[in-house]
Amino acid sequence: MSCQLESLNHLKSPNAAFEGTDGPVENAKIKIRVRFWTLARRVARTLGRLPKKRPVCGPSLPISPGDIVLVRSEKEIRALLSKEGSYKGCYFMEEMFAYCGKEFEVIKEIVNFFDEAKRKMVRTRDLVVLKDVQCGGRLQPRREKCDRTCFFFWHKDWLCKAE
Amino acid sequence: MKEKGARSHKYAAGQLVRIKSGEEISAGLDSAFERDGCVFMGPMGRWTGQIRAVKKLVYSCFDEFSQQMFRPRAPLYILEGLICEGDTGDFQPRCDRSCPLLWHEDWLEPPD
């Protein structure tokens, strides 16, 4: 017996892919765009054009399940993100900005997770999931919405402990 | 609600449903513990017989491996409060992703 993520492929109907939204050309464009910005950022860092970004509130806070945390402001979080919108490998989706400035309960710390893209378990650190903070499925530039309702991954540096 | 999947969904968001018994669900699974490609994971058995609210109707899913959106072969649901605890037995160590579980419509029934 396997995990639902592992066998997601079995769920697909014969004409499962949406025409025009996720074709090979569109996927290739997305991959090229991501690779371009990754490379551009690496070059800029090497040349010293981009400052090394550090969290304003200091190093990773000791945040545990059950803690109430405050999501830092959009401005603070944007300052931490790379041009691709990620921080230390964790992507911050546009939809997540709606939660800035609000308080939530930490339900779990992500130590290991099944990386669907790589089809393997990976170990990570400083990531948590927050209660009732789930993806609404808007995946730009795709038109169709995803209904999987996954929990967002939050890097601890995007959060502050609520007083 | 507009039908987008292969079949229309019988239950609506917010509606209460009962998860069928383990025996009833098992009878409809293939040798891979799947129905229409949807796996019934062992730990999901702890909620059989319980009444839960439908949180969301699943019309489309994004597959991170193929980077494609797809439509499931059968009506699927996400039920309120039921997330994967990562204890499928397959994964060592356990997965902390906390995915909302997918429930096949045939595993659900009206509460009375």
Image (tube, coloured by chain):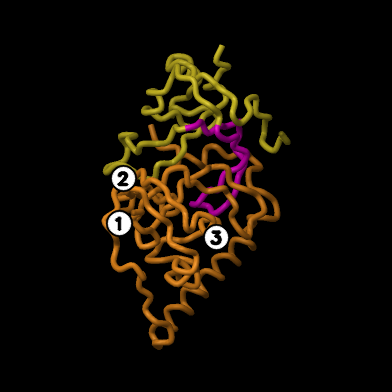
Chain colours: A orange, B yellow
For image coordinates 45% across by 16% down, the residue present is B49
The x and y percentages for residue A1 are 38, 31
Label 3 – label 1 distance at C-alpha: 22 Å
Among the two numbered marks 3 and 2 on one chain, the one whose residue lies closer to the N terminus: 2
Part of the protein shown in magenta: B55-80
For image coordinates 36% across by 51% down, the residue present is A128
Label 3 – label 2 distance at C-alpha: 25 Å
The x and y percentages for residue B107 are 52, 22
Choose between B15 and B92: the one closer to the eye.
B15
> Is B48 located above or below residue B85 in the figure?
above
Choose between B29 and B84: the one closer to the eye.
B84
**On the image, numbered disc 3 is attached to which residue?**
A94
> What amino acid type is highlighted by mark number 2?
Pro
Indicate which disc residue B28 carries.
none
Among the two numbered marks 3 and 1 on one chain, the one whose residue lies closer to the N terminus: 3
Indicate which disc residue A125 carries.
1
The x and y percentages for residue A61 are 29, 59
Are marks 3 and 2 in one subunit? yes
Camera-near label (3 vs 1) is: 3
> Is B48 located above or below residue A114 in the figure?
above
Whether residue B67 appears in magenta in the rendering, the answer is yes
> What amino acid type is highlighted by mark number 1?
Arg
Q: Is residue A15 left or right of residue B28?
A: right
Are marks 3 and 1 in one subunit? yes
Chain under callout 3: A
**On the image, numbered disc 2 is attached to which residue?**
A65
Cβ atoms at labels 2 and 1 below 8 Å apart? no
Camera-near label (2 vs 1) is: 2
Determine whether the residue tagged by mark 1 lies in a helix, strand or loop. Answer: strand
Q: Residues within 10 Å of mark 3 (few under 14, many from 20)?
A: few
Cβ atoms at labels 3 and 1 below 8 Å apart? no
